[in-house]
Amino acid sequence: EMTEEQYELLVTALETASICPKTIGFSGYVRLCYFAANKCEQCIREALKPETIPDKGKEG
């Protein structure tokens, strides 16, 4: 499980490195590209919000 601080660091790292969520396997969660509007952070946040990431390896 990721803390809020870790989540913020991930969003910042992806935005700083210009990594689009589509290129790392989250294409199904990217409804609209915000690149032209310079809103990549918004796109990254929407694609990586906790409810979009399936729990892997958890039982119960």
Image (cartoon, grey):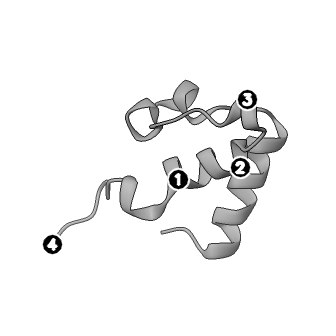
Image-based side of 43 in relation to 37, left or right: left
Establish if 35 lies above or below 50. above
Q: Nearer the viewer, residue 6 or 45?
A: 45
Q: Which structural element holds mark 2?
A: helix
Image-based side of 4 in relation to 28, left or right: right
Q: Which residue is mark 1?
A: 46
Q: Which residue is mark 4?
A: 60
**Sequence-first tag of 3 and 4:** 3
Tag 1: amino acid: Glu
Kindly report which numbered mark, 1 or 4, lies closer to the viewer in this rendering. 1
Q: Nearer the viewer, residue 22 or 60?
A: 22
Tell me the number on the disc at residue 23. Answer: none
- Number of labelled discs? 4
Establish if 10 lies above or below 18. below
Q: Residues within 10 Å of mark 1 (few under 14, many from 20)?
A: some
Give the CA separation, mark 1 to mark 3.
16 Å
Give the CA separation, mark 3 to mark 4.
42 Å
Which residue is at a point 27% across and 64% down the rendered structure image? 58
Q: Which residue is mark 3?
A: 36
Kindly report which numbered mark, 3 or 4, lies closer to the viewer in this rendering. 3
Q: Which structural element holds mark 3?
A: helix
Give the CA separation, mark 3 to mark 2.
12 Å
Residue farthest to the top, as pictured: 23
